[in-house]
């Protein structure tokens, strides 16, 4: 469904668990759809985590929009009963927005205080 968000990885067949003394080098064994090794594209795990987190913020924004749209629809279409449901949905959407906003700014403040580049 969201295949365009993160490149698809697949394992190559010559990487077998239990062979060798050091185990499997997953960064070399797992390949992207263009047959590039994951370790060549993503030099450190933080890059991949940042890619996933950025995409989760986008998905969260779309869900937030849909919740507000649903609350508006219930408010208009269902009368008194719909007003209460719309109020609860809007309240939940607002709490979600505040949590997403807070999480983003907490990470930014930590980045500012520590000097570590989080990449968001």
Image (cartoon, rainbow, N blue to C red):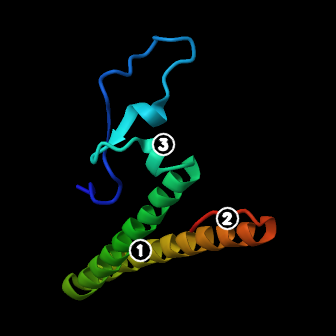
Q: Earlier in the sequence, mark 2 or mark 3?
A: 3
Q: Which residue is mark 3?
A: 39
Mark 2 residue element = loop
First in residue order: circle 1 vs circle 2:
1
Image coords of residue 113 (percent x, y): 80, 69
2 and 3 marks in contact (CB < 8 Å): no
Depth check: 66 or 115 in front? 115
Q: Is residue 71 above or below residue 99?
A: below
Residue 68, percent from left and from top: 35, 80
The mark lying in front, picked from 1 and 2, is: 2
What whole-number distance in Å separates the C-alpha atoms at marks 1 and 3? Answer: 46 Å
Q: State the residue at coordinates (40%, 31%).
A: 29
Q: Are marks 1 and 2 in contact (CB under 8 Å)?
A: no
Identified at 49% across, 50% down, the residue is 42
Q: Considering only vertical position in the picture, is 22 above or below 117?
A: above
Neighbor class of circle 3 (other Cα within 10 Å; few <14, some 14-19, many 20+) is some
Q: Which residue is mark 2?
A: 117
Quickly name the residue at label 1: 88
For the image shown, how many numbered marks are present on the structure? 3
């Amino acid at each position: 469904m969201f295949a365009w968000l993160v490149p698809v990885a697949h394992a190559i067949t010559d990487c077998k668990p239990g062979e060798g003394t050091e185990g499997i080098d997953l960064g070399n064994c797992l390949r992207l759809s263009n047959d590039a090794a994951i370790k060549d594209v993503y030099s450190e795990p933080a890059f991949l985590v940042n890619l996933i987190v950025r995409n989760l913020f986008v998905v969260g924004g779309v869900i937030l929009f849909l919740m507000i749209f649903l609350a508006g629809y219930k408010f208009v279409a269902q009368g008194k009963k719909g007003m209460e449901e719309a109020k609860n949905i809007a309240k939940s959407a607002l709490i979600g927005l505040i949590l997403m906003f807070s999480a983003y700014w907490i990470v930014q403040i930590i980045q500012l205080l520590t000097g570590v580049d989080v990449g968001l």
